[in-house]
């Protein structure tokens, strides 16, 4: 569904992503792992079109989207929930969700989806008219995910959804991803929390210093202690 | 008493004019960080739009109003397309200089193709009539200007709260990338900001032109400076701040003009700017600006 | 290496070129061209003065031209012959109508007064940064303009003040420009200049390292004001007559464009920007007056200078947003070119072996 081939992303003279290839198949959850500074966020940002790629090719749903700007990629159904959540702090929960549906014309469907996600995330219903900055970190993460879902993506990329959240909430986020997969959503999850991420994923990639250093079956990766030790160090509990 | 009421009405109308202009500056600044010094030229373009329309054919002076507003909006969009789009995300100083460049080009284009001398321009006559309430005489222009400004600000508030593009503009002021991740086109948001700033400048232009009765190529330079001062006074980038700053500046100017002793009125602008300077030393973030310490996390 | 020596070496190239240029004009050019060259060197002094503040603090200043006005008025009030003063400004305050000093002490006094005003305004200005600081400089410009215009007993208001001894000439302007370039480069490369530039990039980090941002801002402000003041003296003592309109927005924008166009953070950039705008405006001005081309006189086109100036600014900024030289000085460019050459040579050597 998503194919990244030989992607290079540069910041000035520095290559943050070097020749990375990665695929996500329909219905899969793929985990993208690796330490800080490995280039994971850069890669997904480039995939969604926020950062320009210096070389390589991005295909989504059969179309070449390498040079497309983020707004048109999102409209095609490839959405990113960015690192650090980035909810619109000054806007209400309701307005955040409305903006999430900005690409859609079907008002009835949007209202339906809002209902659905308020049921899925009851806390957002309680805080429906509050400005987003008054929400806790976990609540903001829920809002960010719900906001992304409002565009009815075919493939959702989640960048560090568990970052800075309490363990109980992290657990809740991963349960949520399992639920979403049941409803047919394809996902690419960027995580430092390797064990949990591989627990729900079908396949995994490990990046280090801008390159993919390993890819494989998620279950096998969790079992391979050497691998976890070598590349993910702190990820092992 | 009558004198006082007259001066208050006058102060509100001047304050409204500054508020309209400052709002336009603020809405563009809040989204792309550009201090658009070519904003004053939107007034000039509005004025010349009426002038050209009258030269060709203008069946009713009423039509001058939509023509002025439309002219200013189109000019704002054109400035963005031709000059400001190329310097998106550049430093503030690059933006300021580019805007100066645009402003100088427009001013001199009118000098070259029309003339340096002021040209008379007619706006509807009723705008320059007087409203009599008992013994009190009030200029219709001032009352209409204040009312129109109030309506425009309310309409803008509704737009920013109730429409998707309005929400997107408010969101973009804080995090443009996240807005694009919603699938909202950056160009559309910026275009909307410029169109609104042009609309507001066009409204202000109608009143400025009615008051002066004439247009000239440099008529926009003083108003834009006042608007800039108003914006910073209220808190740069804050829309409420722009309105408050504009009205405060207008009221300050008119009251000083009205109540200063005659021999000091020549120094009025110096006093106004000194007052603004004192306020800014006390409140560097502006009257409505949130005081934040360096290194505070953005919420 | 010693800072003075290093700055001296780095300043040799631009100063040398400018002096050669000026000498050539002195030797061969016609009076009109000498006047143009004088204006160039004078504007260069002012632009470099402005660069010292804007380039190091990152704050746009609308107010520097008022220092040009202050020093110009100060030197004029001290040097206009007493007989003339009686008719021009008989009621001048502070007994100024009866005071007359020689040109050299007058210049020194004028610069000291400019420095004093700069120091006083700087004490206020140093406390704020960003947009608030910019409005404060704007306030300074407006206030000084209003005073020049409205304090008629002192300045004769909008009518010009004349009778200032015309003592300046091209060599003086060249010398002033050379000194200005040296001072600006010295400040830029000094510890204080570096710290100030760092603080304009990241105020919090600079403060955390103990950079005394306020006092450095004040220092930059006063040095730049005095340099601009020198420009004001060059202005008054060349024309012999001054009026408030020379020290207002037109001049402000012109100088600001010179500084930003070439690359605000670099002294060399200011030289390039000043040259470009001076030459361009002069060419456009001759077109404006209706030039004679192939024997036929073209019509006059007022507004062409401004139109040209604006177009060049917009084009330059849209094509090179950080200015023509960006952050680089001439010596940086020479060094980079040399490095690239050695790299290329090394690469060729590797390929050959």
Image: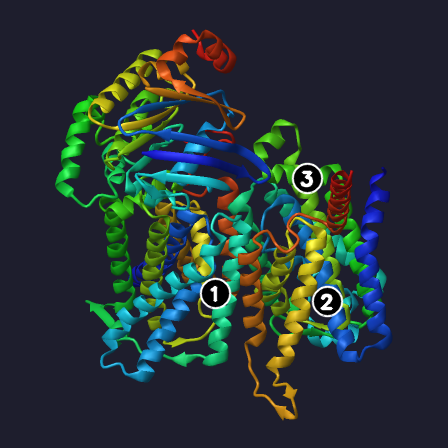
* In-front residue for pair B110/B246: B110
Q: Residue at x 67, y 52 (%)?
A: C51
Which chain is mark 1 on? Answer: B
Using the image, tell me which numbered label, if any, was put on residue C40.
2
Residue tagged 1: B221
Label 2 residue SS? helix
Q: Nearer the viewer, mark 3 or mark 2?
A: 2
Image vertical order of residue C209 relative to residue C250, above or below = above
Classed neighbour count for the residue bearing mark 2: other residues with Cα under 10 Å, few (<14), some (14–19), many (≥20): many
Q: Determine whether, in the image, residue A11 is placed left or right of residue A151.
A: right
Q: Which residue is mark 3?
A: C216
Task: State the image quarter where residue B14 is shown.
Answer: bottom left
Q: Nearer the viewer, residue B294 or B269?
A: B294
Q: Are marks 2 and 1 in contact (CB under 8 Å)?
A: no
Q: Chain of mark 3?
A: C
Q: Closer to the camera, B139 or A168?
A: A168
At 58% across and 58% down in the image, what residue appears?
C141
């Amino acid at each position: 569904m998503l194919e990244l081939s030989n992607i290079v992303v540069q910041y000035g003279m520095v290559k943050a992503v070097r020749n990375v290839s990665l695929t996500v198949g329909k219905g899969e959850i793929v985990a993208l792992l690796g330490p800080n500074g490995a280039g994971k966020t850069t890669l997904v940002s480039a995939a969604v079109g926020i950062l320009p790629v210096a070389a390589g090719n991005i295909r989504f749903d059969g179309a070449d989207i390498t040079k497309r700007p983020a707004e048109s990629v999102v409209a095609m159904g490839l959405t990113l929930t960015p690192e650090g959540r980035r909810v619109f702090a000054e806007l209400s929960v309701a307005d955040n969700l409305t903006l999430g549906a900005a690409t859609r014309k079907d008002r009835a469907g949007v209202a339906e989806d809002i209902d659905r996600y308020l049921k899925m995330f009851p806390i957002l219903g309680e805080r429906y008219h509050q400005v987003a900055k008054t929400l806790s970190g976990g609540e903001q993460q829920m809002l960010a995910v719900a906001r992304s879902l409002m565009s009815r993506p075919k493939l959702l990329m989640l960048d560090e959804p568990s970052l800075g959240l309490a363990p109980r909430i992290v657990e809740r986020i991963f349960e949520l991803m399992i639920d979403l997969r049941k409803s047919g959503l394809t996902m690419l999850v960027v995580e430092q929390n390797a064990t949990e991420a591989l627990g729900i994923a079908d396949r995994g990639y490990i990046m280090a210093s801008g390159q993919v250093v390993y890819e494989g079956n998620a279950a096998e990766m969790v079992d391979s202690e050497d691998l976890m030790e070598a590349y993910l160090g702190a990820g092992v509990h | 008493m009558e004198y006082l009421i007259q001066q208050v009405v006058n102060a509100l109308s001047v304050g409204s004019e500054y508020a309209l202009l400052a709002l336009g500056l603020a809405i563009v600044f809040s989204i792309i960080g550009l201090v658009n010094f070519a904003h004053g030229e939107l007034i000039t373009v509005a004025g010349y739009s009426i002038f050209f329309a009258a030269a060709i054919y203008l069946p009713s002076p009423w039509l001058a109003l939509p023509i002025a507003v439309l002219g200013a909006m189109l000019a704002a969009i054109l400035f963005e397309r031709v000059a400001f789009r190329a310097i998106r995300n550049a430093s503030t100083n690059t933006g300021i200089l580019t805007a100066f460049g645009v402003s100088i080009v427009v001013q001199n284009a009118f000098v070259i193709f029309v003339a340096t001398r002021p040209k008379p321009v007619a706006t509807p006559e009723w705008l320059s009539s007087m409203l009599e309430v008992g013994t009190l005489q009030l200029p219709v222009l001032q009352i209409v200007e204040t009312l129109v400004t109030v309506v425009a600000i309310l309409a803008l508030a509704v737009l920013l709260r109730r429409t998707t593009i309005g929400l997107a503009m408010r969101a973009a002021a804080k995090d443009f990338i996240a807005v694009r991740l919603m699938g909202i086109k950056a160009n559309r948001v910026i275009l909307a900001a410029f169109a609104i700033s042009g609309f507001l400048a066009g409204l202000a232009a109608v009143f400025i032109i009615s008051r002066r009765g004439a247009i000239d190529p440099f008529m926009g330079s003083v108003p834009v400076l006042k608007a800039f001062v108003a914006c910073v006074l209220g808190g740069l980038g804050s829309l409420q701040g722009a309105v408050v700053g504009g009205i405060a500046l207008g009221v300050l100017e008119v009251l000083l003009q009205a109540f200063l002793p005659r021999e000091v009125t020549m120094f009025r602008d110096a006093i106004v700017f000194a007052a603004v300077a004192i306020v800014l030393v006390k409140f560097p973030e502006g009257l409505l600006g949130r005081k934040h310490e360096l290194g505070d996390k953005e919420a | 290496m010693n800072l003075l020596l290093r700055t001296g070496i780095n300043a040799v190239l631009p100063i040398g070129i400018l002096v050669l240029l000026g000498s050539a004009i002195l030797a061969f050019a016609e009076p009109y061209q000498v006047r143009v060259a004088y204006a160039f060197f004078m504007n260069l002094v002012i632009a470099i003065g402005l660069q010292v503040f804007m380039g190091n603090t990152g704050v746009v200043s609308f107010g520097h031209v008022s220092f040009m006005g202050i020093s110009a008025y100060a030197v004029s009030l001290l040097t206009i012959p007493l007989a003339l003063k009686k008719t021009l400004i008989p009621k001048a305050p502070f007994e100024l109508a009866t005071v007359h000093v020689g040109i050299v002490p007058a210049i020194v006094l004028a610069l000291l007064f400019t420095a004093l005003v700069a120091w006083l305004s700087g004490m206020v200005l140093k406390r704020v940064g960003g947009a608030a600081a910019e409005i404060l400089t704007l306030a300074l410009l407006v206030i000084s303009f209003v005073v020049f215009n409205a304090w008629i007993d002192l300045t004769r208001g909008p009518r010009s003040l004349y009778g200032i001894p015309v003592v300046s000439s091209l060599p003086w302007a060249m010398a002033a420009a050379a000194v200005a370039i040296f001072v600006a480069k010295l400040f830029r490369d000094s510890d204080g200049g570096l710290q100030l530039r760092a603080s304009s990039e990241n105020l919090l980090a600079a403060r955390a390292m103990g950079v005394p941002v306020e006092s450095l801002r004040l220092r930059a402000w006063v040095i730049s004001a005095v340099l601009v003041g020198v420009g004001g003296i060059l202005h008054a003592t060349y024309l012999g007559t001054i009026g408030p309109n020379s020290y207002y927005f037109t001049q402000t924008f012109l100088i600001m464009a010179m500084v930003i166009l070439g690359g605000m953070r670099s002294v060399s950039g200011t030289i390039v920007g000043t040259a470009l705008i001076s030459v361009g405006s002069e060419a456009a001005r001759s077109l404006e007056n209706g030039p004679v081309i192939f024997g036929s006189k073209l019509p006059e086109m007022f507004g062409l200078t401004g139109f040209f100036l604006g177009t060049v600014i917009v084009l330059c900024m849209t094509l090179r947003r950080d200015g023509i030289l960006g952050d680089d000085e001439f010596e940086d460019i020479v060094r980079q070119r040399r490095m690239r050459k050695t790299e290329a040579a090394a690469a060729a050597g590797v390929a050959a072996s």
